Amino acid sequence: MRHRISGSAAQVAMVDAILFMTIMLVASAVILGSSGYRDNSSEDFAAIQQYSTDFMETLMAVDLNQANCSFRSVSQVLCDECLALRQGVTTEEYETMNALILATGRNLIRPGMDFAVSCGMGSVFISGNAPDLDSLPGNRCANMMTVYPGEGLGGDVAITVFVWVV
């Protein structure tokens, strides 16, 4: 006997997965927040680096609802944007999705921290407080992932997520 999952059941499962990831980020933020940072210690940097890695992995995996009611992960949306920019499409076409990525990240990042996302060698830059890569604070952690879109699509797309304490 075969069981089929309806569209609404699949959406509920996806929402549950996103909620689970959010709860795990909040739990890690509580643990990091209760540890009592000491300025400029290597232990603090290691904790922030681990948090930034977890934040990047979670943010890149979140599925965004696109205009046609299909869902794509943040990493897929950013990869598509970089590939389109390579073909000469303007960034205005992606402003709505970039705003959604920023809002999603704001909902995930723990209080007292900020983030920025860059991909395509800075051709895509998403941040609420920094206008460009050069404006990022020096005491930030960076995590990078590479997406391999396939042959003939202009090469790999590197996505970098920066996290820092405000």
Image (cartoon, rainbow, N blue to C red):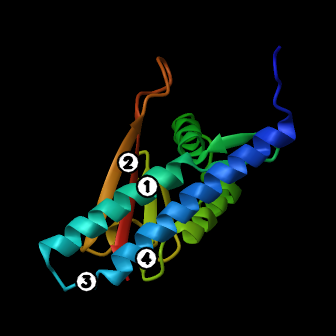
Q: Amino acid at mark 1?
A: Met
Tell me if I can see residue 54 in this picture. Answer: yes
Residue ID at (44%, 28%): 148
Which residue is label 4 attached to? 30
- C-alpha separation, residue under disc 4 versus residue under disc 3: 12 Å
Nearer to me, 29 or 71: 29
Residue ID at (19%, 85%): 39
Residue ID at (83%, 14%): 1
The first of marks 4 and 1 along the sequence is 4
Label drawn at residue 56: 1
Q: Local crowd at mark 4 within 10 Å, few (<14), some, or many (≥20)? A: few
Left or right: where 109 falls relative to 39: right
Label drawn at residue 37: 3
Quarter location, residue 133: bottom left
The first of marks 2 and 1 along the sequence is 1
The first of marks 2 and 4 along the sequence is 4
Q: Amino acid at mark 4?
A: Val
Which residue is label 2 attached to? 121
**Secondary element type, mark 2:** loop
Which callout, 2 or 1, points to the residue nearer the camera? 1
Left or right: where 92 falls relative to 106: right
**Secondary element type, mark 1:** helix
Q: Amino acid at mark 3?
A: Tyr
Nearer to me, 38 or 85: 38
Where is residue 101 shown, x and y percent of the image? 60, 59
In the rendered image, the vertical position of residue 127 relative to residue 56, given as above or below: below
- C-alpha separation, residue under disc 3 versus residue under disc 2: 33 Å
